[in-house]
Amino acid sequence: MLNVNEDAQEDITAEMPYALTSARSLTDYPLSDLSSASDISTKPLADLEFDPIYHQTWLNTHNYKEPQTYSSCQSTSSRSSRQLSDFAWKTFDQQSSRRNSPQSSFSPYSIDQQMITTSNNHLISENLLQIYHDVLEHNLSCWLTEMTCPYQLGSGTSTRIKPEWGSSWSNRIYQRTIKLDRVLQSCKFLQMTRSEDQAASKALHFAIMAFATQWAQGSHRHREKHPTETLRHGEDESNISDEFDRILQRHFWDQAQCALQQVAAVESYRVACAEMIFGVTQRPWNPDEQTLEHKVDAQGHTFAINSVFSQALDIIRKEGPPIYMESAARKMHAMKFRCDALEAGLGRQYGSREKAADGIAAISSEDRGTIGLLYWLAIMFDTISSSMNERPVVVMDEDCVQDAQKENRQVANLDNSATQSRWNLKIFVQESIEETHQTHWPCSYETAAEDIVKSAPVKVLLFRHLSYLQNAVRKSAHGKHIEEIIHSTMSLYQYWIRTHGAFFGELVQNYSLVPQRIQGWFVCISAHWHLAALMLAGLLEFIDDNALGIEDAAYSRINSQMAMGIRNRSAQELSDLARVATPPAGDANMGVPQMPDFHRATNEGTLLTEPWTMILIRAFTKACMVFLSEADESLCYTETTFGHTSDGFERNMEQAENCMKGLWLLGKKSDMARKVAEILSLASRKLRNKCLG
């Protein structure tokens, strides 16, 4: 069998050079020419070796030692590595200003210039890979674990993943994905030509680079403080369209898209992971998209909340359908299907696949675990993406039956009906749902991490129930069927309120005392949950307004204002999350990073460590619209009663401002978030003007 550490190390070392351009560095081109340069080569940098810093922080993870205590403090060696990485990022940060300065006296073909070019490539790759590690692998170490993966029955233990919860963590999923592909190729399960194998590696690494360059906003946006003149006056951003970081973003986005198109028909775990990573990566906008026409006139005297919401949704829709996420889910499903078939002995019916069947039976337990983990990752992404975009799930319930469901069915001799295949809370919660245990702060690092890890599948379960409800409404299902789904969904919602939600509320109240990694994990999972809750509230209102359920149940929901209660609660908690997870303004702590142990491009505010930016954009936009609507209604009530502006108006405007600050911070890495923040900021000023007069 393959040696886990050494062979994974060799794979990474051999494959990473695909991620950078060759021949001439990106920084060799004048900025005015780079974005349209047709002679930028994308073949591997076979003649370059990565510097020792790169090997230490990215490759040399097999020397990882489990920390003695779970703490947010980095070890001395880790801090040294971060300081070196920060130095490299500052160098990268200065590229734009250098490009606009008088040309260097070096000849582009001199040895000195070639050394600078090589050094720049090292600095860029080191920083982008560090961002990938600090953002995506950081989050995956929380919500993709053996403890909660439903496709590894009997392996629900935290022993193997506890090291990943500490102050240092490896690129676990990246390494295991590459190793799994290698193992499956060796046993003839995956059959790729040499060119396809190279193309798969190229696609994965370009996807990682495209993902990481979202945070490459150093030359302009990284220095901004909220509120900015851009948000106040709609400043033309064409002056930054040619900055180095923007060119780098568009370059790697284009290269990743091209590389993924070339391997669209290749079934490989590397390709599927590349598609998932690219699926959560937002497209950088072109300069002509930066200056959108907005219908909200900040100097006028009329305000239409529906118009503002419509404009914000138009901006969000620019992202387009989640085609890469869906393609990844299909590939993961197909490969898992084949694995199951071969293990069941079906492969031996086809002569050429007999060796593959024997090879599958011989792979290690860790590689089998990787198959389950990656399958669960794809299903989680598919579940969230499909319900968020109101699209059908790729992997249907009957095709993603989880190990606990299979075991229960065998014991009870149940059939494979749709009702029995549907996900339920008991799959993920081992304890009695009625007698739940709530974690309280303060607690140990390990206890907090374990609670948050267990909350991740519960969050995904709510999105899955949203999909059930969306499908039932779309198919005009019987009212009884719709009510069954609503009852199951509300049981899940109440479970969250009693357990993880209550604990997360305590973490918000004591935010400054919570370790950094715990902050990053719970903020992201909580924001995801509240987006699903806001969507649920809207769907419940639609069902009740159109009499799609049962009359008595609908009357009870309307009378208790269930939908409104869910919406207001989640909007409030999202506002609180944005308040604590964005940099404070106007006090002694201004300018101090919230996540000092993370990469310089991500450490300003906790929200910057969220890998799936679109979820936060949708969540904060919906929450902000709740508060702006409430503020607008309070003004209308004031005009009707000839009274003074109520305290409710100011409270709603303050909460809306928190959400806008969250969107503005995300705007440092997302053009979409920046434009939505601008729309809502203009609407906020419109309401202020309406209040004054």
Image (cartoon, rainbow, N blue to C red):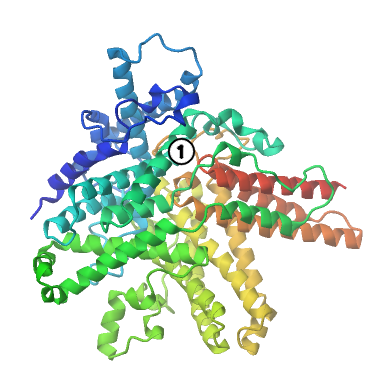
Instruction: Locate residue 584, reporting x and y percent.
Output: 58, 40
Left or right relative to 225: residue 394: left
Answer above or below: position of 355 versus 128: below
Give, as a three-letter code, the residue at label 1: Arg
Quadrant position of the N terminus in the picture: bottom left
Secondary structure category for the residue under label 1: helix
| Residue 601 visible from this viewpoint | no
Left or right relative to 654: residue 487: left
Left or right relative to 691: residue 53: left
- Out of 378 and 373, give the one closest to the viewer: 378
Query: Which residue is situated farthest in the front direction here?
Result: 38
| Residue 222 visible from this viewpoint | yes
- Point 56% across, 78% down: residue: 473
- Point 67% across, 52% down: residue: 656
Q: Looking at the rendering, which quadrant does residue 266 occupy?
A: bottom left
Answer above or below: position of 242 versus 213: above
Instruction: Locate residue 381, reporting x and y percent.
Output: 40, 61
Instruction: Locate residue 534, reporting x and y percent.
Output: 58, 65
- Out of 272 and 692, give the one closest to the viewer: 272
Q: Looking at the rendering, which quadrant does residue 400 occupy?
A: bottom left
Q: Residue under circle 1? A: 250
- Point 51% across, 69% down: residue: 497
Instruction: Locate residue 144, reporting x and y percent.
Output: 33, 59
